[in-house]
Image (cartoon, rainbow, N blue to C red):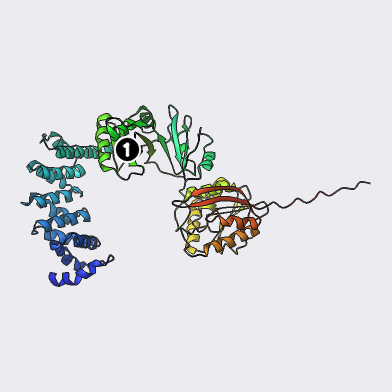
């Protein structure tokens, strides 16, 4: 060990390095530096100490009892960030009775972020003893996070002290506790149930895949699409499980009637949508038992904490079976607000997506499975086709092609051993056979001419950063045109428009083309076909 002062002098310059990770022996000195630290240094000290959580909790706990007010507040905040630890809770509990009000409030905040059987009792005693509104506000917050039935009773029986902010804190704490208690009675979503009445429904997808997705929805009465959305109707005998089967969809939701924003403001309009007859028909169909829990999300507006609390309070008064629960909700309420109205969509959250269970491993720049499914649908594989993915990555395109037609031959090549290992693992999970090899897509000649070449190749935004990408893909297109079987097709995502000219020059003609969002940038989804071999002329038969 070395003296604290000497240790601090040696350690201070190291804190300016964002990657600094202290040794255990450094932690006591770093903790003591919090006593006189300004805000900037405090942030650096916390960042370093959080990399040694066990040692930091022990050091902070040992300092807390004798610390002055400012130092104690910083220690409480550090212990809060370090999480629930025996040493932390044991050191913080006595601070609820400190003579210094700042220390009491800091200890209350810290304990509110921890889990321990002793905390609720200690906070309730502090609540009963507290008289200052500022202290009771902090205690109400802490009880809302950690309390149970007894805390709810104490907060409910508290008399009105005439402080509007304290009243709001108590109301929110009671809502939070009620929400926690209700979690034991959460209703589950049953996707196998049939709707009693036709329900408007919408499937969301990547921008550019709407028409392809609508072909997957032949059982549903789909309507005119808009960017990234395919609306339709869900009605018996179809179920929510059927609606979740399309492989090109990102998610599925139920749009509720648009609500005008009236005197009650935006929160009242959102609640009106959530408790509308249309929403209740959805809840009653798919969550027939237990508490219905919803989580609010605001499209294009970030997290609206105050608005979410306002909605939660109003919702608790409008319908006691529906509760706002941001951490453990079964339904998401996606809110899109306009100048004079608001639209809300209900999306099931607690339902497992089983469409892509084969996806055990991924590699950088691998296709999103819905993109792989779109490529397979444009490819339209047939029985006995040979399908080659020259940039196979983790194998999603090959697997999705086999999902449409199991009786095909699969070939995959890549320049990465790790990618081929991931593809093998995923193919095994899908119970599919494929020939995988380490090969260059520009020179590999399959043992039999492929009927389909299906791939999502490297994109400049995702992998290659040099100017060679255009040349690499141009060489690949020329080679693909050469090795394709007559009448075969190249189905791929082209990152550069000029590659279409290369393909035409190589003898391929485009039969399908759509601009598709790949997650922040666009590429062309294309089907480019090679002319079929000319038929041999019929031989004339001479009779005589």
User: Which residue occupies the extreme left position in the image?
Assistant: 99
- Decide: is 337 above or below 370: above
Query: Would you place residue 168 above or below residue 455 in this image?
Result: above
- Disc 1 crowd, CA 10 A, few/some/many (<14, 14-19, 20+): many
The N terminus lies in quadrant: bottom left
State the image coordinates of residue 378 (x, y, percent, origin top left): 57, 47
Q: Most extreme residue toward the right, as rendered?
A: 544
Residue at screen point 54% across, 36% down = 218
Residue 187 coordinates in the image, percent (x, y)? 33, 35
Q: Residue furthest front?
A: 339
Q: Which residue is mark 1?
A: 294
Q: How many marks?
A: 1
Q: Is residue 437 visible?
A: no
Compared across the picture, whether 394 is left or right of 501 comes to left
Residue in the image at 24% along x and 35% along y:
313
- Residue 275 in view in this figure: yes
User: Percent position (x, y) of residue 122?
Assistant: 12, 46
On screen, residue 449 above or below 278: below
Residue 322 spot, x, y in % from top left:
30, 33
Q: Which of 284/257 is in front? A: 257
- Disc 1 element: strand
- Horizontal side of residue 4 vs 46, given as left or right: left
Residue nearest the viewer, comparing 108 with 238: 108
* Quarter where residue 65 is shown: bottom left
């Amino acid at each position: 060990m070395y003296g604290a002062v000497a240790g601090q002098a040696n350690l201070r310059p190291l804190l300016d390095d964002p990657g600094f990770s202290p040794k255990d022996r450094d932690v006591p000195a770093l903790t003591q530096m919090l006593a006189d630290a300004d805000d900037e240094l405090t942030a650096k000290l916390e960042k370093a100490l959080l990399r040694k959580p066990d040692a930091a909790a022990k050091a902070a706990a040992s300092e807390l009892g004798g610390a002055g007010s400012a130092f104690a507040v910083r220690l409480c905040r550090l212990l809060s960030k370090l999480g629930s630890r025996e040493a932390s809770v044991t050191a913080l509990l006595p601070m609820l009775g400190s003579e210094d009000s700042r220390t009491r409030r800091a200890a209350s905040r810290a304990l509110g972020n921890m889990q321990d059987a002793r905390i609720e009792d200690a906070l309730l005693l502090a609540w009963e003893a507290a008289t200052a509104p500022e202290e009771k506000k902090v205690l109400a917050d802490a009880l809302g996070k950690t309390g149970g039935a007894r805390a709810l009773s104490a907060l409910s029986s508290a008399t009105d002290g005439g402080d509007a902010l304290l009243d709001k804190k108590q109301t929110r704490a009671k809502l939070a506790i009620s929400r926690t208690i209700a979690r034991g009675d959460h209703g589950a979503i049953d996707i196998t149930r049939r709707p009693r009445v036709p329900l408007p429904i919408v499937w969301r997808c990547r921008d550019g895949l709407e028409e392809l997705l609508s072909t997957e929805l032949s059982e549903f009465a789909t309507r005119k699409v808009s960017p990234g959305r395919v609306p339709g109707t869900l009605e018996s005998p179809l179920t929510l499980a059927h609606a979740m089967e399309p492989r090109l969809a990102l998610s599925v939701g139920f749009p509720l009637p648009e609500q005008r924003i009236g005197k009650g403001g935006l929160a009242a309009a959102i609640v009106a949508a959530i408790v509308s007859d249309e929403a209740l028909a959805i809840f009653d169909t798919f969550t027939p038992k237990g508490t219905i829990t919803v989580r609010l999300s605001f499209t294009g507006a970030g997290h609206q904490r105050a608005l979410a609390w306002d909605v939660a309070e109003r919702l608790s008064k409008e319908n006691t079976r529906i509760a706002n629960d941001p951490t453990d909700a079964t339904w998401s309420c996606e809110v899109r607000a306009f100048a004079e109205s608001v639209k809300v969509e209900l999306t099931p959250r607690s339902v497992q997506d089983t469409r892509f269970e084969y996806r055990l491993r991924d590699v950088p720049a691998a296709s999103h499975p819905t993109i792989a499914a779109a490529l397979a649908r444009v490819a339209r594989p047939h029985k006995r086709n040979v399908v080659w993915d020259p940039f196979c990555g983790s194998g999603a395109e090959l697997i999705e092609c086999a999902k449409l037609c199991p009786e095909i031959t699969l070939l995959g090549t890549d320049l990465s051993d790790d990618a081929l290992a991931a593809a093998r693992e995923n193919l095994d999970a899908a119970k599919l056979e494929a020939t995988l090899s380490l090969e260059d897509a520009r020179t590999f000649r399959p043992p039999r001419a492929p009927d389909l070449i299906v791939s999502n190749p490297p994109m400049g935004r995702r992998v290659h950063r040099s100017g060679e990408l255009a040349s690499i893909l141009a060489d690949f297109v020329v080679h693909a045109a050469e090795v394709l079987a007559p009448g075969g097709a190249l189905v791929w995502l082209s990152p550069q428009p000029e590659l279409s000219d290369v393909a035409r020059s190589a003898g391929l003609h485009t039969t399908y083309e759509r601009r598709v969002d790949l997650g922040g940038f666009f590429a062309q989804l294309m089907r480019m076909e090679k002319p079929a071999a000319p038929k041999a002329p019929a031989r004339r038969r001479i009779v005589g």
